[in-house]
Image: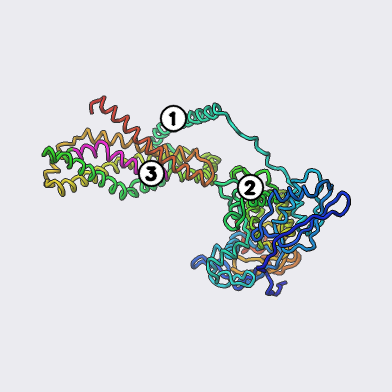
Amino acid sequence: MTREASADDLLRVEGLTLAFGPKLVQQGLSFSIRRGSIFAVMGPSGCGKSTVLKAMIGLLRPAAGAVFVDNEDYWAASEARRIEMGRRFGIVFQNGALWSSMTVAENVALPLQMFATLDPDAITALVRLKLALVGLAHAADVMPSELSGGMRKRAGLARALALDPDVLFLDEPSAGLDPIASKRLDDLILELRDGLGASIVMVSHELPSLLDICDDGLFLDTDTKTAIAHGAPRDLQAGCDHPTVRAFMQRERADPADTEPAHGKG
Amino acid sequence: MTTSRTAPAWRLARTEERSALLILEGDWLARETGVRDQATVERILDEAGDAERLSFDTGGLGAWDSALVVFAKMLRDAATRLEVDAAGLPQAASRLLALATEVPEEFPARPATRETLLARVGHRTRARWRDAVAVAALVGETVQRGLVALTGRARMRAVDVLLLMREAGAGALGIVAIVNGLVGGILGFVGAVQLRRFGAEIFVADLVGIAMVREMAAVMTAVVMAGRTGGAYAAQLATMQGNEEIDALKALGIPVYDYLVLPRVVALVAMMPLLYIYACAFGLMGGLVVGVATLDLSATAYLVETRGALNSTQFVFGLVKVLAFGALVALAGCHIGLSAGRSAADVGRAATSAVVAGIVGVIALDGIFAVCADALGI
């Protein structure tokens, strides 16, 4: 099931160990993300999925191990270089994390204003395109507080797309959305992947979307604090021997020692 | 990533009678080679003239990103007479273009809101009136619930009140001491310069004593608390509003007033008299230090003079004022916090207006007290 890492993977993680002070979160994680794939970081609530994501996007320095972006060690680089590498990432936070004092269009425009030398008309045109891509062209001049949860998430997606990222990170994209909105978001993610050719890394424990769109992944365990399975969610569902993974994928209760099934934030 | 990029280029070719072909070359990368503007798009459409169909040839196209999709979308949006056929674009680009043109209209375009001057004035006035009513209701509720609380039946948690008291009382000791000590010292200086001319140096003690106890200790302490505690109350409650914490309280049936407002008002009102006495002590001490250091007065003479100048009426007057100031600052902070919007910017605005309302309110109230005291001959 495990695929050999190859040098041309866009993102490669080796021996990653994460901890908050003395509290170990995850250890010894090694995986790589192919160009154009949709990679899932799965696992029960509280296993540290979001923490793994934080280490990949530069918000949390790992206790050990390395993250390679195009074969360049991300955490070994200088801060200026890290910011430069980070511009290839687009990040969609769980609740959109839109800046509340700006309109939706200004939210999308800010990365372009900060990191690209474009005239205002060009920025307006790009912002309009990104908002149209996520179906929010009409909400450009609206304040984030007026948007619904799903729209906020899509506005966050438009902002993440502002700089044409090579990798798109999504933290719980379908959390808090109804099944239809969640499906639409999944379709949108697929469309965008095909259109942009970006790789997508998503943290999720929503089975339907995991099975639907992800073609690679990693399953984190709370007890052993490491990855216990690698592979596409579909394959893991079809046949994985590990009881925890099987329980998660089949939505059944494993042995009593197992934690409750996924709910809330991971 | 290669570094050498060729500039994007385009030229128009006529294929058949009524169709044009736009040949795209070079690298179309927004951050490196820019985005084409509306004028370029118009020019291309003009050049296409009476063609009914515009298709693309991207055989010589290099790297591309949103810049290409934006260009195609602008062409499509601006084209009135002809049809833009995206089939010639790279497949991924035409998919993105299709996605961007789908436009599921979910958000109703808001009607342009341009109000007349009269309407604006009317809305503002009504908003102010509603505000005034809300404040009056809050004051009324405070009196009502405060009386209930006195009988021990309000749903207020003692631990909350104690924590808030520590925050508003002990936490403010340092800044109250510094501010009032300095004000006392400054009054001492001002008095010394003037009174020395009449050989009435000893009356500096009277001046500092009466000014501090009647006015300055109360006003300065209230101003400090407006900045420190009133602003904090507003920011805290506004943040709770934004996190739906207040909705959660309401949904559970916990009276927001008893749980959030009353403890704050009680804590601040209870702490204000203590802070006032403490502030008086530091103010008098500031005056004493200046008097002894600059005027050749003995400390004993200064203290005896101060004692002669002050009587209990002055202190009672100061205490009454400070209680009113405390209630005003706490109520303003809570009211503004509870009526704030839900965004981060709203929290900032709430804190600002709570501080401004607190300071202005304290000084205005002090003016009213001064007029009343004059009328009553206190």
Whether A21 is drawn above or below A108: the answer is below
- Gap between marks 3 and 2, in whole Å? 35 Å
Pick the residue in front: A118 or A102: A118
List x then y, in percent, for residue B352.
Answer: 44, 42
Q: Secondary structure at mark 1?
A: helix
Residue B227 - label: 3
Left or right of A167, for residue B376: left
Chain containing the residue with disc 1 = B
- Gap between marks 1 and 2, in whole Å? 36 Å
Q: What segment carries the magenta color?
A: B207-231
Residue at point 30%, 34% (across, down): B321
Left or right of B96, for residue B281: left
Q: Quadrant of the C terminus of chain B?
A: top left
- Gap between marks 1 and 3, in whole Å? 23 Å
Residue at point 23%, 34% (across, down): B314
- In the rendered image, which quarter is residue A252 located in? bottom right
The residue indicated by pointer 1 is B136
Furthest residue to the right?
B17
Dot 3 crowding, Cα within 10 Å, few <14, some 14–19, many 20+: many
Q: How many marks?
A: 3
Left or right of A188, for residue B250: left
Q: Is residue B9 visible?
A: yes
Chain containing the residue with disc 3 = B
Pick the residue in front: B79 or A164: B79
Query: Which of disc 3 and disc 1 is earlier in sequence?
Result: 1
The residue indicated by pointer 2 is A149
Pick the residue in front: A239 or A185: A185
Q: Secondary structure at mark 3?
A: helix
